[in-house]
Image (cartoon, helix red, strand yellow):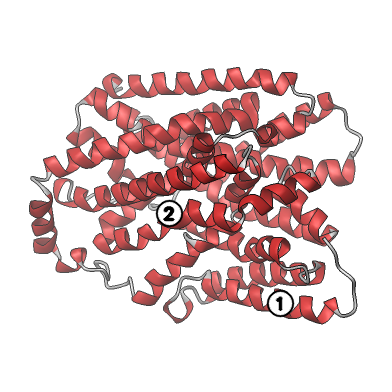
Amino acid sequence: MNWPVITPLIIFLGIIFAVGFWSNKFVIQSDSFVKEYFLGERQLGGFVLAMTMVATYGSASSFIGGPGVAYTKGLGWVFLAMAQLATGYFVLMVLGKKFAVVARRYDAITLIDFLKERYQSTAVVLISAASIIIFLFSSMTAQWIGGARLIESLTGLAYPIALLIFVGSVLLFVVVGGFRAVAVTDAVQGVVMFLGTLILLIATIKAGGGISNIISSLAAENPDLISPYGAAHDLSPAYVSSFWILVGIGVVGLPQISVRAMSYKNSQAMHTAIIIGTIVVGFIMLGMHLIGVFARPILPNIEIGDTVMPTLAMEVLPSYVAGIVLAAPMAAIMSTVDALLILVGSTIIKDIYLNYFKRDAEVSHIKKVSFAVTALIGVFVIVFALRPPDLIVWLNLFSFGGLESVFIWPIIFGLYWSKGNKYGAVTSMLLGMGSYILFDRLYPNAFGFHTVVLPILISLTAFVIVSLVTSQKYNVTH
């Protein structure tokens, strides 16, 4: 056990759990358990909103998987990753005030609540729920693996034991605190992520003898490591450009991010969040991916890409500082897992169970079911995470693409196009999900683009055509 490294992490987790137990009083005292547990009573301020979006989006993929891929592919992957700069801006500007206003009018607690009221369709609800459960299991598996890899690297424990420790900690936190605990701790975790990235980037540059020396070493090993096309020339302009859809504009269609846009308290909070969120996301994404590339001359021949970041931190920093810095990926992973657990739990409980099976359930019963479902989800994800891939980033990006293919147009057109109707939404969602899975399995990266591009275009076309054709026959209103 490397106690100088582990101790700061234990202290950090202690703070997180203290916030969780503090938040539990709001869950206990709230007049609406569902609204408080799953949405924090819509009371997020600008700074907390910005940080909860940053922390939810900045996941194991950003802090563990991203640097691992950058280590393998070089500076081209850093360039590609910067498409994420506009994430918070696009989500809050596209959804913005209108989404918050409409969500309050519908009394929507989840994204599916909004879609249900907007389209008045059971099919939309069921397709949405199935999509969230299917694709977010992939994303949660990536986070479970990332957290376990981190604990494994720090403690020397076997991977299965590290996985159980991480999952147990997260499940206890979410069950106790709910959405408010997740949002408030995200503010703490976002700050930790920012500072951890800054400290490790400076230490890595210093350990490598300065940026010019690191670049020279990379060029000497393989000139393609410092080109925009990647070490294996697999980062074509079309592929890189398509990431502006996958991790830029398309993030509007991610339920775990879009639900944040209905949780802030006023327009000033939203405007503050846009500015802070854009700055913090840009710095973290640039910093962490540069760290992955710059690690290559310092730590050559690392076989498992997901171990680059924790191994580097322990190599270039004093032990106690490494422990503080490694709280950053732990923060990122925990906050993302928290958000995903809340989202999948709300989908199963609020959108399916309470809507179609037990509408008149008492609060005590809802609490028990909520806690039980959250725990059960964690157990299922453990099973999937027991055989991890070398790079978890691909699991995360698969989840992103699938969710965006299903949700982006029903959300956007649901807000801004009065002729959009349930027939267009159902067709768009089915074709988006089906085509994404087929392309991913049979023809990934079609025409040089990321797999998400064609399904999003297909779902767009389907939504518009079907809505226009059926709008003449059916009178559809908000």
Q: Earlier in the sequence, mark 1 or mark 2?
A: 2
The quarter of the displayed image where residue 454 is located: bottom right
Residue designated by label 2: 393
Above or below, 82 relative to 7: below
> Which residue is painted at 61% across and 30% down in the image?
180
Q: CA distance from mark 1 to mark 2?
A: 33 Å
Instruction: Give left or right: position of 249 versus 39.
Output: left
x%, y% of residue 161? Answer: 46, 31
Q: Amino acid at mark 2?
A: Val
Q: Tell me if 314 is positioned left or right of 411 in this view.
A: left
Left or right of 386? Residue 109 is: right
- Residue 305: give x, y in percent of width and height: 32, 50
Residues packed near mark 2 inside 10 Å, few (<14), some (14 to 19) or many (20 plus): many
The label nearer to you, 1 versus 2, is 1
Residue 197 % position (x, y): 30, 40
For disc 1, the marked residue is 464
**Tag 1 secondary structure:** helix
Q: Considering depth in this image, is 414 or 10 the residue closer to the camera?
A: 414
User: Which quarter of the image is occupied by the C terminus?
Assistant: bottom right
